[in-house]
Image: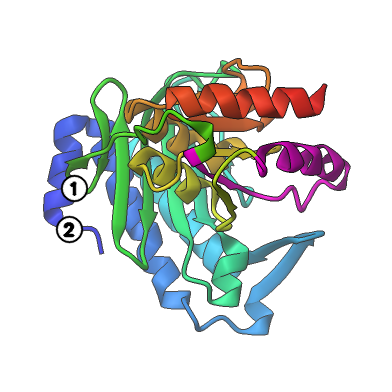
Amino acid sequence: MITKEQIQFAEALSQEAGLAVRAAGRGAEVLMNYWRRLSDEQIHHKGAGDLVTEADLHSEQTIASFLEAEMPEAAILCEEGTERTGKGPIWYLDPLDGTTNFVQRFPVFCVSLALASDSSRVNPELVCGVVYNPISEELFLAAKGKGSYLGTKQLKCSPKRNFSDAVIATGFPRRYADELASYLKEFGAIYPDCRAIRRAGSAALDLCWTAQGIFDGFWEHRLSPWDIAAGILIVEEAGGVCSDFKGERRFLESGNIVGAAPPIHQELLRHIQLARD
């Protein structure tokens, strides 16, 4: 699990980053108590292709309660319905990104937590972001202006410049049937021109792996702020570029996200826009 040294490193970046790491660690402990132990009664359907488990709910409650105690002035927006209003900064919390993977015992899931500067703005500035994979014990974190890290090792996005060499990550718009046709057009435009496309089932980890250079880029439709806020800052602090499908920074509002190293981002965005015209 998260070590004392990792917490101290995060606190040296910023007080908020240290708090986020501590919170993510608490949620991850909850998830691991449920890992491969879920009963059918602990799995619920929110909608088509969308699950929630007792692990999600317990992790969210644990993290939200901790954050409320440590930073009472902050608003909190969570995937599973826990919400706290406020006029100060805002936390975006996904207590279990990759719920279907978790249910299927596919070991790709994480806790994702980000802090933004102003809860009154539609697209506030991201201050810090933490993504923790409790299976691999990989801790990704970023603080605004201070870089992105895996543990204590600084991250840099892929140095690739040619789109034909790029491995692109994505996710399918399973919950939004009206998005499928547009997505398949984009897939059809991108797939022949890149090296490969991969789909792991956790947008937060896909963005972190893009920051790490494992993936060269990532795109997905209609995600929620808690899915992408932490990963966006981690990509950008690793030298990458994030935008919506119009090339603007309204990704938290639209949920449409393209993240990559600058040359790959330019080409990935161009392919998406051509497919959508």
Q: Looking at the image, which is closer to me, 13 or 246?
A: 246
Rendering colour mode: rainbow
Residue highlighted by disc 2: 3
Q: Dot 1, crowdedness within 10 Å: few (<14), some or many (≥20)? A: some
Q: Amino acid at mark 1?
A: Ile
Instruction: Report x, y in % for residue 271.
Output: 67, 28
Q: Position of residue 149 (x, y in %)?
A: 25, 40
Q: Judge by depth and name the residue closer to the eye, 199 or 69.
A: 199
Q: Quadrant of residue 100?
A: bottom right
Asked if the residue under mark 1 is in contact with the one under mark 2, i.e. CB atoms within 8 Å, the reply is yes
Q: Which mark is residue 111?
A: none
Circle 2 Cα neighbour tier, 10 Å, few/some/many (<14 / 14–19 / ≥20): some
Quadrant of image for the C terminus = top right
Residue at horizontal 44%, vertical 68%?
A: 31
Point 47% across, 42% down: residue: 207
Q: Is residue 72 visible?
A: no
Q: What residue is shown at x 35% (from left), y 34% (from top)? A: 157
129 in the magenta segment? no
Residue that mark 1 sits on: 7
The range drawn in magenta is 165-192
**Residue found 74% across the figure and 47% down from its top:** 173
Residue 170 covered by magenta stretch: yes
Asked whether residue 101 is in view, the answer is yes
Toward the viewer: 257 or 111?
Answer: 257
